[in-house]
């Protein structure tokens, strides 16, 4: 900074201080001292520091930038990357582990957040602590991983930095790297043997975070590194469940390819992957799940089966998705603690959702109890014997299971019969529609 600029700033400050009745002389000195560091004016800093050794370790009293409050010269110099000044301050005996009063950050933290490797090296060679945590529990490794500063991260690891220290929310540097999508930081930490299955305060591992964010590269790398694909967090949610909740269709497919468990339950509700997908009306994801071998239609802890919600809300579009993907309509809608159960058609009838009743009974050969309130077109479902045509369709669909769509395509039958087996008269979908668009 030019002397003219410095004098102008000092002139303005003097006028303000006089107006406020403050001790202008002292504050002028403090501001000049701060400016010497902020402007990398080493010559001025040396002059002001002569015979005042305590000054170099003193907090800035007056600053232009509020972010610099609580700093001492070595904090700001390392953050700005003023290598000659940092070297001078270290040789002058400045404390290389001095902390700021609020954030409790050390010069090492500032060297890392400022991405200044040379300053970091000088600090560590002078005895600075590499694993000191700030007020948020973050170490230098947390910041380097989060920012993707891999050269600094490599150097910290070389200097024996602990790569698994948790912050105040139990997040490790690996989790910070995942949250900011820093794949190179992830690779660096994994190669250094970090704990890939460490848990944060919610019981999440890094894979949970990656699945929420749909970062395919990081998911792949974490799986190769040995992440627990079926790890349940404090709510009982697996990485797959997180991918479903965040509507990350491609991640769902990828996790299924890794053979993760589709039938684990959330701890509080007992909801499965199917419950989550159907409740949120995620059509593509529901189709993907139902087309996967091994997925089970089972009740949650309240006795509610996955399709119950769409019956209660009269969601015909989601019902068509379930029909198209061969959901097991032999399963009830709800089981009560007495052991009694109600079918989906019965529940729909109770709520006068007659279009749903017709679709379910047509597909599932369900027999209804006669009811004077039901529309005339439902009377055909009150008879005890379904038509042979419907009975055959139900049998074939039951045999094909999750392979329904491909199985029907492979059958040596006329298109019209294939369309009937696929229940296109109920759904309106074409036979070729493997996964319906959102």
Image (cartoon, rainbow, N blue to C red):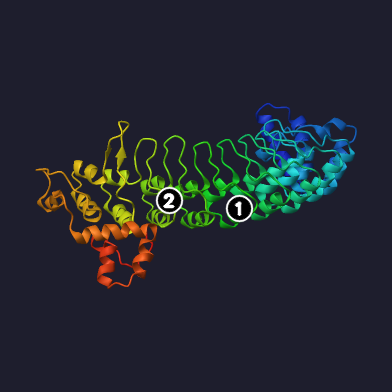
Q: Residue 360 at what x, y percent from top left?
A: 24, 52
Please say if 124 is above or below 436. above
* Label 1 secondary element: helix
- Residue 78, visible in the rendered structure: yes
Please say if 417 is above or below 189. below
The foreground one among 354 and 366 is: 366
Q: Residue 252 at what x, y percent from top left?
A: 48, 54
| Quarter of the figure with residue 352 | top left
For disc 2, the neighbor class at 10 Å (few under 14, some 14 to 19, many from 20) is some
Placement of the C terminus among the 4 image quadrants = bottom left
Q: Residue 296 at what x, y percent from top left?
A: 41, 48
The foreground one among 395 and 68 is: 395
- The residue at the point 37 percent across, 48 percent down is 278
- The residue at the point 45 percent across, 50 percent down is 244
Please tell me whether mark 1 or mark 2 is closer to you in this view.
Answer: 2
Q: Residue 202 at what x, y percent from top left?
A: 55, 37
Please say if 246 is above or below 57. below
- Left or right? Give the position of 256 relative to 314: right
Q: Name the residue under label 1.
A: 223
- Residue 82, visible in the rendered structure: no
For disc 1, the neighbor class at 10 Å (few under 14, some 14 to 19, many from 20) is some
The foreground one among 293 and 176 is: 293
The foreground one among 329 and 189 is: 329
Q: Mark 2 points at which residue?
A: 295
Q: Do the residues labelled 1 and 2 touch (CB within 8 Å)?
A: no
């Amino acid at each position: 900074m030019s002397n003219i600029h410095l004098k102008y700033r000092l002139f303005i400050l003097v006028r303000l201080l006089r107006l406020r009745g403050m001790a202008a002389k002292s504050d002028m000195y403090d501001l000049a001292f701060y400016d010497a560091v902020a402007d990398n004016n080493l010559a001025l800093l040396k002059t002001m520091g002569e015979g005042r050794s305590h000054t170099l370790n003193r907090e800035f009293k007056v600053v232009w930038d509020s972010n610099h409050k609580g700093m001492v010269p070595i904090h700001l110099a390392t953050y700005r990357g003023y290598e000659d000044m940092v070297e001078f301050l270290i040789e002058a005996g400045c404390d290389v582990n001095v902390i700021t009063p609020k954030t409790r950050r050390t010069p090492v933290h500032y060297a890392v957040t400022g991405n200044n490797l040379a300053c970091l090296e000088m600090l560590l060679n002078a005895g600075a602590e590499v694993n000191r945590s700030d007020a948020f529990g973050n170490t230098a490794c947390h910041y380097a991983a989060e920012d993707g500063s891999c050269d600094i991260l490599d150097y910290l690891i070389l200097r024996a930095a602990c790569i698994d220290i948790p912050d105040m929310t139990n997040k490790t540097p690996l989790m910070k790297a995942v949250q900011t999508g820093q794949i190179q930081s992830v690779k660096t930490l994994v190669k250094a043997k970090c704990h890939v299955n460490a848990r944060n305060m919610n019981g999440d591992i890094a894979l949970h975070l990656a699945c929420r964010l749909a970062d395919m590269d990081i998911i792949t790398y974490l799986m190769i590194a040995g992440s627990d694909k079926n790890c349940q967090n404090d709510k009982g949610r697996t990485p797959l469940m997180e991918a479903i909740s965040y509507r990350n269709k491609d991640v769902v497919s990828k996790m299924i390819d890794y053979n993760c468990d589709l039938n684990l339950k959330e701890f509080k509700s007992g909801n499965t992957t199917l419950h989550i997908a159907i409740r949120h009306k995620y059509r593509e994801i529901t189709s993907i799940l139902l087309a996967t071998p091994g997925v089970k239609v089972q009740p949650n802890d309240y006795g509610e089966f996955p399709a119950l919600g769409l019956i209660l809300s009269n969601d015909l579009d989601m019902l068509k998705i379930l029909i198209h993907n061969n959901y097991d309509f032999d399963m009830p809608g709800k089981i009560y603690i007495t052991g009694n159960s109600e079918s989906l058609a019965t529940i729909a009838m109770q709520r006068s959702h007659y279009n749903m009743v017709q679709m379910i009974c047509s597909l599932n050969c369900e027999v209804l109890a006669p009811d004077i309130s039901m529309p005339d077109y439902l009377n055909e479902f009150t008879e005890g014997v379904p038509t042979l045509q419907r009975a055959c369709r139900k049998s074939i669909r039951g045999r094909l299971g999750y392979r329904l769509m491909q199985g029907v395509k492979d059958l040596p039958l006329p298109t019209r019969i294939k369309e009937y087996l696929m229940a296109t008269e109920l759904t309106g979908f074409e036979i070729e529609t493997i996964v319906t668009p959102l």
